[in-house]
Amino acid sequence: MVSKRCVIALAGCLLAAVPAHAETEAVVYSFAGGSDGNNPNVSLINVGGLFYGTTSVGGGSANCEDGCGTVFSVTPSGQETVLYAFKGGSDGAYPYASLLKFDGRFYGTTGLGGSSNCTDGDGCGTVFSLTSAGKEKVLYRFDIGDNGTSTDGIDPIGSLVNVDGTLYGATGFGNGAAEYGTVFSVTPAGLESVVYEFPDYGGGGHLYDGAGPSAGLINVGGMLYGTTASGGTAGHGVVFSVTPGGSENVVYSFKGSSDGANPTGGLINIGGVLYGTTNDGGAPSGGCPGGCGTVFSVTTAGVETVLYSFTGVHDGAYPQSSLLKVGEKLVGTTQWGGDITCNKHQEFEGCGTVFSVTLTGTEKISYSFKGGSDGAYPYAGLIDVGGVLYGTTGSGGAHNLGTVFSLTR
């Protein structure tokens, strides 16, 4: 039996938050934990008015504790369909990434599964394609070499990006003796190459280039940009660039103080400036040891600015999502914080928020999750469809197994 394990590689300007506006949250679908899947932790994609995503577990396979995960679709009115349920063997298991629609197919990654030679039979992960009719094909299975170390990476849990017909992604671990992750490419025909290996310079933890990329990459003019959750000069993660030919550059290395720490979400590009979130760091706050996280911008020349530092109370805490530009604001989610009556007296209070931040640093809470039927702990980013925001929560809902939700302004 495949055992479930964690495959997520984790290691300014402070302005007062503005009280929430009256925005209406509705649960589009509550996962029941059977064949429909459970615990969606990804951003949705919109294809012709139908939303597609993955659940990290569920789907009914007995080969994984709690199921091996699914690819699903859901209509705005709440009709859910499972396109594919992973079996936990050579086909993959535990998809943590959003999907990419390209050339008439969906493409994605699984954090585990694939080769039975890898990590005690759990597998090192896969890149897969899927037709809208639910026919799955494994493009590539990550593996280990005869010496017991990875040669191509382990745990590809980030989303893929298409650059001129070739797919690029990152693995959170693996490749050679260093085991600090890779950037890889794979063709739709299944030809995989390691574009860049994050090294340990001579041992001793000197991971100057970064370590543990857990988010997807973005393409800006042919250059790929991403984040690592750790590594860098201070060990708190980096923003990096890498060419398709494998030349890597650290754009910014987080210091772990007021500038933020440990970015686990992806980036967005607005006019040549990159925007993202850090899971930790920011201005000192009594609400979170080590800071409650930030929203930041960074130029491609490496000038970083903190737009907002979370305090860990009503304004949210620990953002791990990518951002979305809506009008003149950036919107995202925090996994914790918000309504402190939810999860009260626990280590981290609150069940998460949807927030917006202006480019000048004014934050507003759009919605604070209550942790009941409305959902709890949104991990991923949002999509905007006709002025309505859609997202997922990893928990909560009618069965406490996650939701797809909408938020109407």
Image (cartoon, helix red, strand yellow):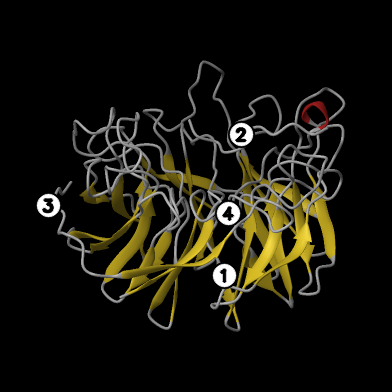
Other residues around mark 4 within 10 Å, as few (<14) / some (14–19) / many (≥20): many
Which residue in the structure is indicated by mark 2? 6
Mark 4: which secondary structure?
loop
Which residue in the structure is indicated by mark 4? 40
Residue 245 seen in the figure = no
Decide which of tag 2 and tag 3 comes sooner along the chain.
2
3D distance between C-alphas at marks 3 and 4? 31 Å
Decide which of tag 1 and tag 4 comes sooner along the chain.
4
Decide which of tag 3 and tag 4 comes sooner along the chain.
3
Mark 3: which secondary structure?
loop
Rendered position, 271 above or below 313: below
| Badge 3 amino acid | Ala
Which residue in the structure is indicated by mark 3? 16
- Residue 19 percent across, percent down from the top left: 16, 59
Q: Which mark is residue 45?
A: 1
Query: Label 4 near label 3: C-beta < 8 Å?
Result: no
| Badge 1 amino acid | Ile
Rendered position, 358 above or below 87: below
Which residue is painted at 36% across and 54% down in the image? 369
Which residue is painted at 33% across and 71% down in the image? 24
3D distance between C-alphas at marks 3 and 1? 32 Å
